[in-house]
Image: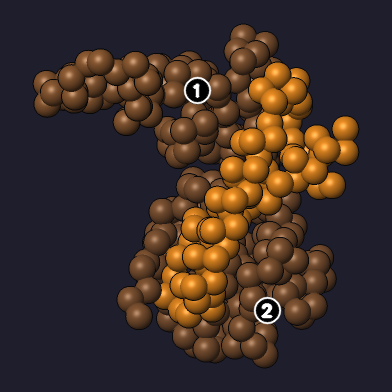
Chain colours: A brown, B orange
Amino acid sequence: MIYLYAITTHPLGDGHFCEGLADRPVFWLSYGRVSAVVSALASAVQPTEANVWRHEAVVEALMADCAVLPVRFGTVFLDKEELGAVLAAHDGDLVRDLERVRGRVELGLRVLWDVDDDPEPPNRDSPAGAANALPTGRDYMLARLKRERQRHECHQRAEALAARIHCPLAHLATDSRKQLLVTPRLLLTSAYLVPRGHMAAFEQELETLRAAYPQLGLLCTGPWPAYSFVTTAVTADP
Amino acid sequence: MSQTISRQKEVTLLDLLDRILTKGVILRGDITISVADVDLIYLGLKVMLTSIETAERMREVAAERYAPRSS
């Protein structure tokens, strides 16, 4: 079977690839305007840490000197003909995506914050000396309203704070993706498509933000291949 | 210091898995990872993310630089 790592525009010189999965050689197949970077494998690959890094290493080696679209881990084709037919069907999208990512890298950011005001637990036992009557339905609804307002305020604060981090970075990127509060402490999860020439400015901006918001944890990784910025997603209906 | 580095490596692995398993070009073809495998990986990711969150001290992290990828 043919394992697909990535798609590029240009036929590549021979012999500058690292070894691929299962220590198999990596080679390319040209189809129309795009090339597929592949290995011939005897069996399916397991998503182990080593295998995932190997896939990534192949893509990163390509990224050094040409535009590259990383393909999702674990994509295999029966043979060259099947792969060729699929690539031909999406040739236009692939070429457009390659142009969008050319000369650009993806930088990932996770921003951690201290959620200082955890909403009160929903059912707090009243203190021992509860001479009070049982809470009424009105009390219950008022308490819920209060919690809902707190939650809303917290979300608004998160949105405003995330925007102050995200906007200056997005300004240096040609495209960006962001998610707010994937978990309560993860204020912002974002990715930026950054021209290589802007990487130093991006790092500089990151330092400025770290100094301006010392209470936040800004974790940046990259440069990655543009995983988050490919639009070619043909869902494989089983 | 080594603790810092290992934490950064965890973040980097997390970021890699997040990308390589859920993003990138999807073409027709067989994806060899079964759904159960992906679920297991995601379970692992959640645990990892939680441990990173728990371990992080905000100010320490703020002092850290751009996470190096290649160690």
Picture quarter containing residue A235?
bottom left
Label 2 element class: strand
Say which residue appears at 53% left-offset and 58% top-offset. Answer: B42
Residue toward you, A36 or B53: B53
Residue A213 image position (x, y, % from top left):
60, 13
Name the image quarter holding the N terminus of chain A. bottom right
Residue toward you, B29 or A156: A156
Tell me the number on the disc at residue A151. Answer: none
| B6 left or right, relative to A30 | right
| A224 left or right, relative to A88 | right
Q: Which residue is mark 2?
A: A39
Q: Which residue is mark 1?
A: A115
Same chain for marks 1 and 2? Answer: yes
Of discs 1 and 2, which sits in the foreground?
Answer: 1
Residue toward you, A74 or B58: B58
Amino acid marked by disc 2: Ser
| A161 left or right, relative to A56 | left
Amino acid marked by disc 1: Val
Picture quarter containing residue A30?
bottom right
Up the image or down, A72 lies above or below B52; here it is: below
Residue A194 image position (x, y, % from top left):
58, 35
In terms of sequence position, does the residue under pointer 1 or pointer 2 come before the other? 2
Residue A87 visible within the image = no
Q: CA distance from mark 1 to mark 2?
A: 47 Å
Name the image quarter holding the C terminus of chain A. bottom left
| A92 left or right, relative to B15 | left
Give the chain letter at badge 2.
A
Say which residue appears at 50% left-offset and 23% top-offset. Answer: A115
Label 1 element class: loop
Residue B45 visible within the image = yes
